[in-house]
Image (spheres, rainbow, N blue to C red):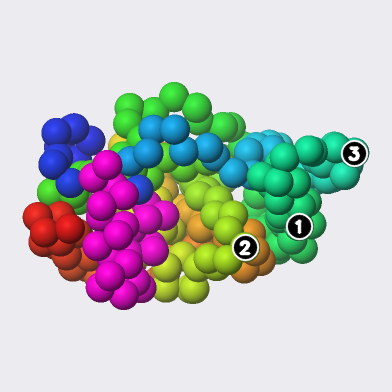
Amino acid sequence: MSTIKKGSNYVISINQLADFSVASEAKKRRIIRQQKKPNKFLVSWYQLSKSRIKKTLENNCDLTPVIEGIKELVNRKPTKPRQVLDRQVSIQALERFVNIKLPTLLKDIPYEIIKKVDAKSIIYKGVEIIVSPEVIFKLKIKDKEYLGAVKIHISKNNIFDNNQSRCISSLLYKYLNEVVVKNGEKVMPELCLSIDVFGEKVIPVPRNVEKKLGDIEILCEEVKSLWQVA
């Protein structure tokens, strides 16, 4: 399929598409404007907390990196207001993550982390959706190889609802099938996971993934329509 070709005039990140799915008309236009002219100097928040969560997910859900991350943040002495806020929310995020119930499979079965992929995005209905999972893993069950992926969302004031999270997990599923799968591997829907840290929830692909992907098609058409006028 040609879904990993670049060249679409319409580009949106997976998290922004999830935001778009529940936004008011005014906010939808604001999201599109931000996507059309992204701020190249935008500073990423909560980098340490996200990296420690990622490391835990890469290591069979061993929480040691998260626990050590909390200790490191507690001992930091930030001076700037932004650094103070980042530290405070990052500690809260890691503490919330400890309470999240992760799939047993990720704790019980050793898996390989896939770091090199052909693309970080897919083109769906003419819209390039930047998926860019934090973790892609491959595990073997009864001599069959399965793929899964995780997208992490950390926002204290913008917790995704279940439908938004299902939008993300469904796109992870589509992305793995169209970009990553090879040599007879299969994508395991139960391991395509949208993790909302402050929502303390892990949402896999819905049973009727085709219906959810159909809903996303409609969103993509709306993105293209608003792109012309935002």
Q: Amino acid at mark 1?
A: Gln
Q: Which mark is residue 92?
A: 1
Q: Residues within 10 Å of mark 2 (few under 14, many from 20)?
A: some
- The stretch drawn in magenta includes residue 28: yes
Crowd class of label 3 (few under 14; some 14 to 19; many from 20; radius 10 Å): few
Q: Quadrant of residue 47?
A: top right
Q: Residue at x 31, y 49 (%)?
A: 34
Which amino acid type corresponds to the residue marked 2 in the rendered image?
A: Lys
Q: Which residues are magenta?
A: 14-37
Secondary element at tag 2: loop
In the image, farthest residue toward the front: 80
SS of the residue under disc 3: helix
- Which residue is under mark 3? 75
The residue at the point 39 percent across, 28 percent down is: 117
For discs 1 and 3, the disc positioned in front in the rendered view:
3
**Within the magenta stretch, is there residue 24?**
yes
Residue 160 visible in this rendered orientation of the protein: yes
Residue type at mark 3 is Asn
Could you tell me how far apart the alpha carbons at marks 1 and 3 are, in whole angstroms?
Answer: 14 Å
